[in-house]
Image (cartoon, rainbow, N blue to C red):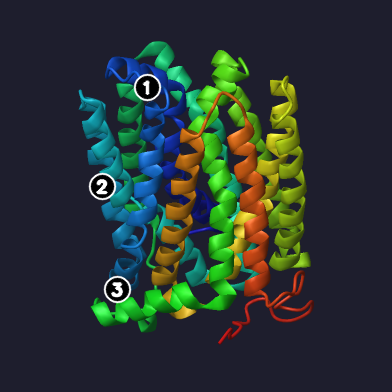
Amino acid sequence: MGYREFIAMMAMMMALQALAIDTMLPSLGQIAADLHVSDPNRRQLIVGSYLLSTGIGSLVPGALADRFGRRAVALVCLAIYVVLSVACALVTDFTALLVLRVLHGFACAGLTVVPSAIIRDRHDGDRMARMLSTVSMVFMIVPILAPLLGQTILLFAGWRFIFATLAVLSSIMGVWVWLRLEETLHSEFRQPIQPRTIAANMSRAATTRASIGYVLGSSLVLAGMFGYVNSVQQLVGEHFGAGDMMPICFGITGTALAFANFSNSRIVERFGARRVSHTALLAFIVTASLQVWLALQPDETLWQFLPVMALNVCLMGFIGANFSSIALQPFADMAGAASSVQAFLRMAIASFVGMLVGQAYDGTAVPLALSLLVGGSLSLVLVLWSEHGRLFRRVLPTGSPRETVIDFH
């Protein structure tokens, strides 16, 4: 498989998770009305429940991928994705829909875990950070377009056809993976399915100081993004009066994230993942402070909120892929288990906090803005802990071999 096809496949595999979230945003009101849900905040659970269950489910596929291979786990997840998308399209009760969304997120968490493990199989160091950024850049095109896709479907059909579309797209993805993806797990790195081995691997992934601060730090930054996703329909569409323009406004912030990942893929090997991400985190905290100040003003407008939010999201693009690369670096021999644990912590914490931020929506941008500032500040503390108080250092100095594996123990 060529470089471009590999990037596209990894990005689209991950993008199926984004589609299951972001295509729902324009339809939340219609789903709530059709299934007789009166509480406007309760409809956010259609998104929040999927995010949270994906985080919890991320604990499972890594160990399976380390034993049976990346390809097999990806294919099983894609098959389940098709079945549960069809089930969601046929549901007639809101509680049943939430149950199916929980099952969907849990069973298909491998689509988040497996691509990271595959990339770690092929690369390490700043080159891995560049690869993750490139994948994220392509992947981010989907969240930009997903609300527009959902809105377009609603113009011609009901919300059930959104789930039907997800089933079709995941079927196409399954055929592509079946025909073109080769196994990347090295035979000497296969791990047995033994509780003691799995527990030891997960414990190592969760307690390595050089890694875990970045995992927890990225989860707190991501929580702000999830809070935005949970509340964007009410905040942007209703409070700021964007209405049917909400998908476009959401796409603007998504474009900022895609631009950041593109830029990061071009500069990270030159400057190093730590220098780039640490600078971005400090800028994120400053921008979040401005966001809080604007939110506390009595007459904040959409055109004040949107550019600052887009800048915050842009800075997330310089944080996310680099933090993930740094966190995975110590685990070449157990990338699947490490990716699982890290995805679990990142998604579970971010989705839970993001759901709380969404449920705290009070008709203003204050809860969201505070979550960005607090999350960014705590993230900085965690990074400083992982780095023993030192920022901006390079583990791979300029001129050293890019593929050298660094021993963090």
Type of the residue with mark 2: Ala
Residue 262 got which mark?
Answer: none
Residue 266 shown left or right of residue 230 in the figure: right
Q: Which residue is located at x 27 percent, y 40 percent?
A: 82
Q: Which residue is located at x 79 percent, y 76 percent?
A: 398
Type of the residue with mark 3: Arg
Q: Earlier in the sequence, mark 3 or mark 2?
A: 3
Q: Please rate how many residues cluster around mark 3, counting C-alpha atoms within 10 Å: few if below 14, some from 14 to 19, many from 20.
A: some
Q: Are marks 3 and 2 in contact (CB under 8 Å)?
A: no
Q: Quadrant of residue 97?
A: top left
Q: Residue 240: percent from the left, percent from the top?
A: 63, 19
Report how far apart the C-alphas of labels 3 and 1 lie in the structure.
45 Å
Write down the residue under mark 3: 67
Residue 387 versus residue 39: which sits nearer the camera? Answer: 39
Name the mark nearer the viewer: 3 or 1. 1
Q: Residue 395: percent from the left, percent from the top?
A: 70, 78
Q: How many marks?
A: 3
- Is 339 drawn above or below residue 288 in the view shown? below
Write down the residue under mark 2: 79
Q: Would residue 254 be seen by someone viewing this image from the given angle? A: no
Q: Would residue 281 be seen by someone viewing this image from the given angle? A: yes
Type of the residue with mark 1: Asp
Name the mark nearer the viewer: 2 or 1. 1
Write down the residue under mark 1: 39
Residue 103 shown left or right of residue 50 in the figure: left
Q: Which residue is located at x 22 percent, y 40 percent?
A: 83
